[in-house]
Amino acid sequence: MCFPKGPAPAEKQAAVDQRVEADEINREAVEDTSNQKREDIQSALESRVERKGKRGGSGRRSLLKSSSGGAGYLQRFS
């Protein structure tokens, strides 16, 4: 019986080249996706910081009057 010996060396090289090209395309797609995610996260953080600065931040207390309506820190201790 005569069995085929397998693919020719040129066919093997073509398969290797195609695999390398496919890996490179896949890597570029992953890099593009990660860059887009990084930009989205950065813009979300920047907009959050801008909004936080406009409203004065949470937990900020007045030195002039207390939350219960009485004298604040400056009036009591100065």
Image (tube, rainbow, N blue to C red):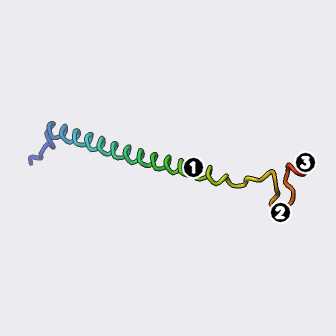
Q: Amino acid at mark 3?
A: Phe
* Secondary element at image label 1: helix
Left or right, 6 with reference to 26: left
Q: Total of numbered circles in the picture?
A: 3
Q: Position of residue 30 (x, y in %)?
A: 37, 46
Along the horizontal axis of the image, is 54 left or right of 32? right
Query: Which residue is pictured at 15% across the width and 40% down the height?
Result: 11
Q: Secondary structure at mark 3?
A: helix
- Comparing 74 with 15, the one in front is 74
Kindly identify which residue carries mark 2: 68
**Quadrant of the rendered image containing residue 25:** top left
Q: CA distance from mark 1 to mark 2?
A: 30 Å
Mark 2: amino acid: Ser
> Residue at 41% of width from left, 44% of height from top?
35
* Disc 2/disc 3 C-alpha distance (Å): 17 Å
Sequence order check: which comes first, mark 1 or mark 2? 1
First of labels 3, 1 by sequence position: 1
Instruction: Check whether the beta carbons of the residues at disc 3 and disc 1 lie within 8 A of each other.
Output: no
Tell me which numbered mark, 2 or 3, is placed earlier along the sequence: 2
Q: CA distance from mark 3 to mark 1?
A: 34 Å
Tell me the residue that label 1 is attached to: 50
Q: Amino acid at mark 1?
A: Glu
- Residue drawn at 53 percent across, 47 percent down: 46
Per the image, the residue denoted by label 3 is 77
